[in-house]
Image (cartoon, grey):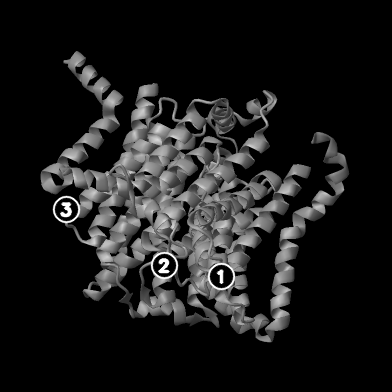
Amino acid sequence: MTTRANTLRDVLLRFGFLIVFAAFFVLFAFWNPVFLQGGNLLNIVEGSAILMIMALGLTLIVATGGIDLSIGIALDFGAAFAVVAMSTYGLDWFSAACAGVIGGSLVGIFNAILVVGLRISPFLATLSTFFIGSSVQRIFTNGGGPISYRRMPTEFRNIAQGDILGVPTEAVIAAVLVVIYYLLLERSIWGRRIHAMGMQRPAAIVAGIRVNRILFGCFVFAAMTCAVGGLIAAANIRMFTPLSGFSYLLDAIAAVFIGAALHPRGRPNVLGTVAGVLFLGMVANGLNLMGLNFNTKDALQGIILVSALAFAVAQRRARGS
Amino acid sequence: MRGEVPSVLKITDLVGYLPLVIFGLVLTYISLHAPNFLTLQSLELIVMQSLPVVLVCAGLAVVVMAGGDDVVSGGIDLSIPATAVLSAGITAQMLTSGMPLALCAVVALAACIVVGLSNAVLITKIGMTPLLTTLAMFVAVVGVNNVITVSRRINVDHSWIVALRAQEIAGIPAGILLVALIVAILFFAAHRTGWGLNLQAAGGSRDAAEISGIDANRLVAQSFVVAAFTGFLCGFFLLARGSGSSPGVQDNLMLEMVLATFLGAAFSPRRVVTLWGAVLGALLVAAISIGFKSIGVNVFWTGLIKGSLIVVVVAFSALAQRGR
């Protein structure tokens, strides 16, 4: 009896989150067979691309021991700079994309100045960036009206609407970024340094890691990544919608922390984040297909989010002891 | 870095007061340009507007006291505004279907305590970080509230709720008196009782508190229930301020709560979150918002001004702390 209970417990501890993942998958598939069709699974991947990109950027910041509440602003700036570069300055699509990424990097540089230069805690610094960035967008668009550019070059539109060998371009971009982030954060010396400063900052300083330089780089790189998400968002609807990045923030935070909870030592990591993003994407898609009304779906999604996080953390705890 | 300390030492005392000085200057500027700003009537308006924020700030201050003031790993409760909106939503929904206010209040209280207890269990038993737990809880509670109210505005004109806004006792609005009383009770509990001392000890240094026999986990759990209770109370003041429950109030309430509470820390001598600091912060934030509106600053700029204020105040207090 005890052995059986023990093995059950072991299985739960090892594969707990995977089982939850699978259970939801089966539930959704059972509810609506459309869920399992190849087209819909591709939908989930395509629909999660922007969230994936944002969550990657956030993973980097959380790995340094901080938090970034302004990733949505970086997305907005990326979209705004790219759209304005094309519509007002008539740049070609590639220069416009670069302008978008540079625009996003401004947000990162601003964060880095606050956190590294003025030593404001990342939470409060990026909260102010969020306030300031939102306000700048309101002032720039005279209250928050979208800037549309219907005659967007096809190449730029293809960032979101084209495909490469049958796979949607945005999914390809997200996948490439996942690989880059994986190599950077989990397989390189920089990644080691980032994790080191995230876990034991004083020790990292004593060990000679240039903490400030790394932190600066991380904020800028994360913001540039989120700006790529902005390019996709802008290409998708052929316009820049101010303040649209905020809607990704909570999901991105959830994905990163689900991922961290899956890690044996509770560290934010790229593969965990990918699992978190796909889980959230699957739940959103599945609940949609259940045909629930908008409010119920929202509430259920929130409750599933809390439970999934609790489950993932409890699993890691139990495994540790 | 250590070497710089002596030369900075004398300036730091001054630097410590700079946040207050800056606020003073901004408010002086506003009152010079809007002569009506400093009248009793507009000050009363500011206080009335800030009442819901004051309540949630007081709740957050208790949580931060118990959990420590590191924003990421210490105590924080972002779900209080959602709890407040839930309390308002349940009350408004039940009132419109003709139930007595007392019954509405009991149901709303039960729902809010459930939120507080869930936070407490997730954080102290399962070991999730407060920031993450309460952020996720915020999303879930707002979702549940949207199901209850079907995301629509509900007007409330119950005489007791209207009284919170309109009734005056000895010339002072009843709402202000009530919030002052609640804050005073919380202050007494947090600063003048054994429970309050243990609470602060737990937040100040968890390890030291536990070694001296204080059950820190239990205090942290209690602080989340207290916070949920302030959210419950705040719900009624939201109903009074907005003449009913409207969807979407929680977002701005959350931003103002965080801004005011951590701004308040910059005013305390040890740069820690305190109840008075949080309340003062809430009043100042309301004063600045209303002040800028009254001198005709475009609403689009409000976020920019608030954001810059956080940066300036927090940067100065960080600077002052480094000098110590």
Q: Which label belongs to residue A103?
A: none
* Cβ atoms under marks 2 and 1 closer than 8 Å: no
Question: In this picture, is B92 found above or below A109?
Answer: below
Which residue is most to the right? Answer: B7
**Residue at (48, 29) in percent of width and height:** A183
The answer to whether residue B106 is visible is yes
Q: Judge the density around disc 3: few (<14), some (14-19), many (≥20) Cα neighbours within 10 Å.
A: few
Q: Is residue B28 left or right of residue A52?
A: right
Return the chain for callout 2.
Answer: A
Q: Which numbered disc flags the more N-terminal residue, 1 or 3?
A: 1
**Residue at (58, 62) in percent of width and height:** A132
- Say which quarter of the image contains residue A20: top left
Q: Alpha-carbon distance for marks 3 and 2?
A: 37 Å
Amino acid carrying label 1: it is Phe
Helix, strand or loop for disc 2:
loop
Q: Judge the density around disc 2: few (<14), some (14-19), many (≥20) Cα neighbours within 10 Å.
A: few
Q: Which numbered disc flags the more N-terminal residue, 2 or 1?
A: 1
Amino acid carrying label 2: it is Arg
Residue under label 2: A151
Return the chain for callout 1.
Answer: A
Percent across and percent down for residue B63 are: 50, 48
**Residue at (22, 75) in percent of width and height:** B98
Q: Which numbered disc flags the more N-terminal residue, 3 or 2?
A: 2
Circle 3 or circle 2, nearest the eye: 2
Residue under label 3: A290
Residue under label 1: A140
Helix, strand or loop for disc 1:
helix
Percent across and percent down for residue B289 are: 58, 72
